[in-house]
Amino acid sequence: MLTERQKTILDLVVRGYIATAVPVGSKALVGRPGLSVSSATIRHEMASLEETGYLTHPYTSAGRMPTEKGYRYFVEYLMEERALSVEEQRMIRHQFHQARMDLDQWLKLSAAILARSARNAALVTAPKADRSRLKHLDLISVGESGVLLLLVFHEGSLRQGLLTSALPLEQGELSRLANELNARLGGLTSEKIRTRMIAFQGFKRRVSQHLVEVMERVDQRQASEIYHNGIANILRQPEFAEAERVERVLGILERRAFLESLLTEVELTHGGVQVLIGGEGRWCEARDCSIVLARYGMAQEAMGILGVLGPMRMSYERCISAVRYMASLMTDIFSESYGLPT
């Protein structure tokens, strides 16, 4: 338990260090709002906060800087999360609505916008459903006997394949077949389609069989695509002046296996934001960093993850607000654009 004075001092030290990257001395806090005590009293309280693990100092005569524990207390009890300004929200929405309707482009754009808004690096995973469900298929005549099969799934992913027919099929006939299959198979998983296609004959059966095979491959994939942007934002931070730290932070974004394990192990509630500080004692690769994560999409349908990565000395209030807003916006976008139910 911290006293009100200790909370005020910790809050001021964290905010001061985030703003300047310079350890905060007691004299810098004298006369600050809510702190009408002497420099000696502030030094005493700082020493107490250091003894209890909330603050530290780089050398004997330096001011104090937050520890992981200090940042954690600040995030959980002291900071005031503020929503992004209406103007910034409007600008972000405008950028999205100017882009053409394409899942890959949406995700690249979202990573770029989040990195710029949070002023750190950003990562976004493609939405993934536990089991894919067919949204729509098209059959297009190619040459004399070829048929292009275009598949769209509810989580927004696209697939295509080429089939051949023993007999020439006119485009009108293919369109009628596609409409029939959409009416009978739309919204179903591969297991249900396999059950229904037993009654199909001829080319309709071949199309359904190919559809099931594609959906089973999609369901077996182990991870979603991971997009990232904004590496330059964190490399400009003084914390990453050392080559070893640069290598570690780049490894987090570039080594897919680590990100996959991190995102798999972190428990994220839909609509909530998770803040990982200094690797939380579990991920040594992230010991120099903080990561803010949230889910987007629709529960029971398709879910993705987006987040911000930066130094522990990140602006938590801004990063959390940016991640929360982007998660809400991305949920709306995928609900509207890719047919996820609201």
Image: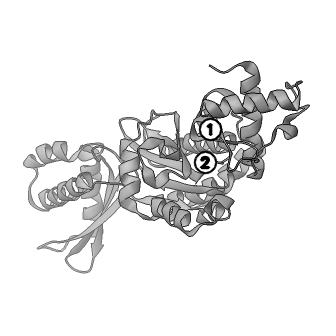
Q: Quadrant of the N terminus?
A: top right
The mark found on residue 312 in the picture is 2
- Secondary structure beneath dot 1 equals helix
Seen at 82% across and 37% down, the residue is 26
Type of residue at label 1? Tyr
Seen at 71% across and 35% down, the residue is 82
Q: 25 or 340, which is in the foreground?
A: 25
Type of residue at label 2? Met
Q: Residue 286: percent from the left, percent from the top?
A: 49, 52
Q: 308 or 311, which is in the foreground?
A: 311
Q: Residue 129: percent from the left, percent from the top?
A: 33, 45
Seen at 66% across and 51% down, the residue is 118
Is the Cβ of the residue at disc 1 closer than 8 Å to that at disc 2? yes
Is 300 located above or below residue 333 in the figure? above
Q: Residue 143: percent from the left, percent from the top?
A: 26, 80
What residue does disc 1 label? 71
Q: 331 or 182, which is in the foreground?
A: 331
Q: Is residue 125 visible?
A: no
Is 44 located above or below residue 184 in the figure? above
| Residue 312 placement, left or right of 171 | right
Q: Is residue 337 visible?
A: yes
